[in-house]
Image: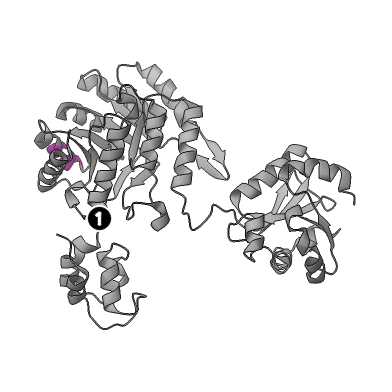
Amino acid sequence: MALTGLEIYKLLPQTNCKDCNYPTCLAFAMKLAAKQADLADCPHVSEEAKTKLAEASAPPIRLLELKGSEGEFQVGNETVLFRHEKTFFNRCGVFLRLQDSLSADELKEKVAEADAYHVDYVGIDLYLDGFAIEAASGDPKTFGAAVAAVAEKTKRPLILLAATPDLAKAGIEALDETRPLLYAADADNWEAMAQVAKEAGLPLTVRAETLDELADLTGKIKEAGVEDLALDPSLSGYLDSLHKLTSLRRLALKENFRPLGYPVITFPGSTESVDAAILAAEQIAKYGGLIVLDEFDPSTLYALLVLRENIYTNPQKPIQVQPGLYEINDPDENSPLMVTTNFSITYFSVANEVEGTGRPAWLLVADAEGMSVLTAWAAGKFDAERIAKDVKTFNVADKVPHHKIIIPGHVAVISGELEEELPDWEIMVGPREAVDIASYLKSMWTT
């Protein structure tokens, strides 16, 4: 059972030394009880107390790690129901299911196509997290060959969908120096599957029709020596998915119910009478951990990955690029210089428009703490003083001797102040919208 804040406090040094960055030991204890602090933050806690506090300080949803030959994936360790409370930390994974009924060449072709999928989204590389190989044939030799074929074409983490211990062992033996997820243990085979997972040191999925049955099985499997688990609550549609996954999250976070404190795996394409893409989107939002798709459709995958990126972005820290002086289309000393903020969408909107003109240009990206132009200006984060500071910080004058700088039209009001901050510079007011940059440069830029 979880300890209360006062129970935790009794096990702490009670010196109020503030080394944990909290004013008192009691305040630290309350944060530990609420899963908002890490026991390691206290350098003075005794080993005996550490043992007693392990349950109270552990994340309510256990971290699950999968490893490919050259890549890894983590899910779990979440501490909140809603991202605005803090943030979601470990993005849910999107995997592609393949069946061993396909020939080795067909498998390799499908894997190669999906593995090569990469899309740049405001500076973020979007891609598939891994593959799930299903033992549809029921034959260990066929399954092992299929797993080997997939592993030959991808370095990403894998899920082995094997219903029996023999199939699971065949899949494991086909891999080297990886950590796949085994799927799945149920009421009929859990002892044998737990033994396979324990011997191989691999995480195991637990599958059941009800949450009570899930909790019962996870308890038994944990006692059998397997700590790293995933849950399959046997979802049957939009409402069932929303209800069960929300219940699992609430039980883990609000009730600290350890038997259900594990990441969830879902198969949206296996549910009849639903749109798999819509169900996958729902499960990305509420609260899937590993989402296994049946089809590789780049347009659908892009939409799902963008949705995931938006949900798992820290709402208190916008997506941003590194401030600095950027080169577009190989500029020289006569090329125009524009300035914008380091909010990713703003940066890529401006950079893409300039790149599309084919005209060489410099782009000064000011540190506006990840805010857009108007938002940053209203918050006092994008003003004449800050722009002038970045001009000097990044030695812009050394690369742009013409000393002309184009500011966004939305902040034309700061042009006078910027002239005072940069007396040797000519301040030009550019267009309000990025789409008008091409026509503006064509008509207004001369050196």
For residue 295, which quarter of the picture? top left
Please indicate, yes or no, whether residue 331 appears anywhere in the rendered image. Answer: yes
**In the drawing, does residue 444 fall left or right of residue 64?**
right
Q: Name the residue rendered at 31%, 82% in the picture.
A: 17
Q: What residue type is labelled 1?
A: Lys
Position of 377 relative to 13 (above/below): above
Helix or strand or loop: what does disc 1 sit on? loop
Is 374 on the left-hand or right-hand side of 91? right
Residue 263 visible from this viewpoint:
no
* Image quadrant in which the N terminus is located: bottom left
Residue at point 19%, 60% (across, down): 55
On the image, the x and y values in percent for residue 269 come to 34, 25
Residue 243 placement (x, y as % from top left): 27, 39
Q: Which residue in the rendered view is the most extreme toward the right?
A: 447
* Residue receiving disc 1: 254
Looking at the picture, does residue 272 appear above or below residue 429? Answer: above
Residue 19 percent location from the top left of the image: 34, 78
Q: Quadrant of residue 284?
A: top left
Residue 199: in magenta span:
yes
- Magenta span: predominant SS is helix
- Residue name at image x 64 percent, y 66 percent: 380
Q: What stretch is highlighted in magenta?
A: 194-200
Q: Nearer the viewer, residue 106 or 218?
A: 218
Q: Measuring from the top left, give residue 24's x and y in whole percent.
A: 30, 79
Q: How crowded is mark 1: few (under 14 residues within 10 Å), some or many (20 or more)?
A: some
Q: Is residue 91 magenta?
A: no
